[in-house]
Amino acid sequence: MGKIIIGEKAGFCFGVERALRITQESREQNQQPVYILGALIHNPRVIADLERQGVKTISDLKEAEPGGILLIRSHGAGPQVFAAARERGLKVIDATCPFVRQEQNYAQELQRDGYQVLVVGDPDHPEVKAVVDTVEGDAVVVNPAQPDQWRTKSFKPKLGLVCQTTLPQEKLAAVVEALLPLAKELKIFNTICHATRERQTETAKLAQEVDVLLVIGGKNSANTRKLVEIGAAYTPTYHIESGEEINPQWLEGKKIIGVTAGASTPQSQISEVVDWLQHNYTGGITMENQVTNGHL
Ligand code: F3S
């Protein structure tokens, strides 16, 4: 008999739930159009739902009609964005995740105290860009994937470090080890958020208990991709956005199917995949339809 095990931490984190709630309240309580600069979360289905409700995702402030509302997403934004929006006559509602705000505050504190601010993470991620903007560009992004870009740089003797909230702990540890010989003083704010740590730890554990792991979430979601990377170290792991993407061959001969999801994946999307598995799986095992998750 086969079974499905769903990670208990799968799905929306606190910051994403909060940003969505603030967005919906802004929509309901105001007559003006609501705009978001960049995708609210990295989940195309949620963005399409919001568009249907009249919340417009824009890529440039010029697309927003003056008098409208600009919602700052959970990834945060630099002070320049807040100022430019107000200058354009937009009311700004800030849905920056409090953990991201804390990361920004630490970066400013390090800058004030004379440290070379280092932001460990993906230089193209909006959260990282916003932290750099918060210290007016006075920061170096340390990309764990490309150590050659920063190992040979000459830094100030005092290094102060914050990191992308979704960074896996081992990547932070590897960067710290590489920086040690370069610094007289190294101050670290471990800004990896607990939601990320919990999901990543749970994914590693789940991947060791199952024969195949399905990770649900936007293909552009960094935190979902990290769960895929973690799962793949232990078991065949596939990144999907919906049940239709499942190739039945992945499940052939597999007795235990693990399902988890990134922090930007709604429960409805997880339920759809589980339903798909329950109705479409016709492989070599019998589905027991055993779902071990409290919130479905
Ligand atoms: Fe915030 Fe952590 Fe989610 S930083 S947006 S609670 S992944």
Image (spheres, rainbow, N blue to C red):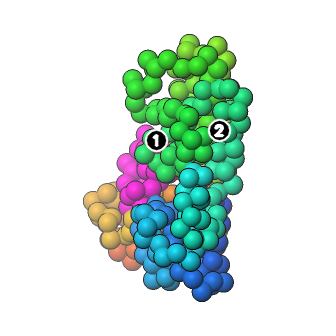
Q: Residue at x 40, y 26 (%)?
A: 149
Q: Is residue 263 magenta?
A: no
Secondary structure under badge 2? Answer: helix
**How far apart are the two marked residues, 2 and 1, measured between alpha carbons?**
16 Å
What's under tag 2, amino acid-wise? Ala
Is residue 116 placed above or below 99 in the rendered structure? above
Highlighted magenta segment, given as a residue range:
211-240
Task: Name the residue located 51 percent from the left edge and 57 percent from the top edge.
Answer: 262
In the image: residue 272, left or right of residue 180? left
Give the structural element (helix, strand or loop) at label 1.
loop
Q: In the picture, residue 151 is in which quadrant? A: top left
Residue that numbered label 2 is attached to: 107
Callouts 2 and 1 close, C-beta under 8 Å: no
Residue 126 in the image, given as x and y percentages of width and height: 49, 51
Q: Which residue is mark 1?
A: 122
Instruction: Answer left or right for 283 relative to 227.
Output: left
Which label was assigned to residue 246?
A: none
